Amino acid sequence: MAGYVCTVAGGKGGVGKTTTAVNIAAAVEEEGYDVVVIDADLGMANLAAMLEVEPEESIHEVLAGGNAVSAALTDVQGGITIVPGEQSLEAFADADPAKLKSVVRTLRNAYDVVLVDTGAGLSHETTVPLGLADGIILITTPDDVAVGDAVKTAELAGRVGGEVLGTVLNRVTAETDVEGITERFENPLLAVIPDDVGATETEPLVLNAPDSPAADAFRQLSALLTGVFFEGETLEDAETVMETGWFLDEDEDGDEDDDSSGRLGLFG
């Protein structure tokens, strides 16, 4: 049976698409599945840098017609495999996004899950992965521009026949108006990821800061998604991954500060 292709998208740069893709990959891999992550952000590839690896081949060379995708497969921590990109303008100019279809087709026959990390904006290179996916996860921060761009990405996905599974709201604090942001999307809010300033370890946090609130959120989100990937479940009525304890401060004695639970937006 062919693997599930999941595109991680969002219109604005810097909202955490690559972080989300990497942490989902790590969590799903922990459950015994084979996962590959493709860096399809052809203009600003950063997957290899985030994982601190220096690959010999890249997705750009594959899309330029120079190599088979097998040459670009790179093993990283946690048993994850990635297809990294490179950052040179020459590589970007030579890469043909249309060839991503054959790359995805090849990988879905070899892996249980293919995660496609996309770039920002609404260009041809970001549209192609939307149409190739079995399901799309939208990533946004509470920033109003980021939310608006994610809404546009959802609309674009519909036009190219893509199915949006839901939205992940990243870098959430106790002051975030989660309910107000959720109302702007037609698809369900799958998870909120806390703005975990204490998790300074390198990505993926699921492996390198496993006890952090952000890692907990990513792990629960991934458990939700495995039902979709392997059991054909839908997420229309899924309960949002969110725990009050992620947003409660602790005082010097280690006691939780309950005042944070009453701030605007998050807990009603």
Image (cartoon, rainbow, N blue to C red):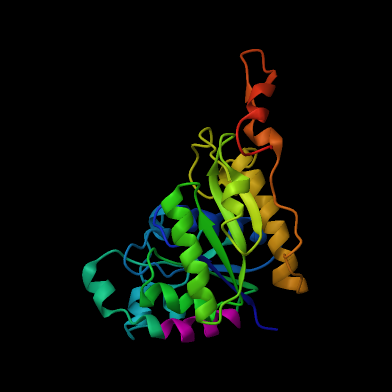
Which residue is nearer to you in this view: 154 or 138?
154
Coordinates of residue 147 in the picture (x, y in percent): 48, 55
- Residue at (61% x, 13% y) in the render: 252
Which residue is nearer to you in this view: 59 or 195?
195
Count every numbered label the image shows and give the total: 0
Q: Quadrant of the N terminus?
A: bottom right
Q: Provide the residue span drawn in magenta.
A: 99-109
- Can residue 78 be seen? no
Q: Would residue 35 be counted in the magenta stretch?
A: no
Coordinates of residue 238 in the picture (x, y in percent): 75, 59
Q: Quadrant of the C terminus?
A: top right
- Residue at (72% x, 57% y) in the render: 223
Q: Is residue 34 left or right of residue 51?
A: right
Coordinates of residue 251 in the picture (x, y in percent): 62, 16
Outermost residue, top side: 253
On screen, residue 250 above or below 32: above
Coordinates of residue 205 in the picture (x, y in percent): 56, 46
Residue 125 lies in quadrant:
bottom left
On screen, residue 134 above or below 183: below
Which residue is nearer to you in this view: 67 or 128?
128
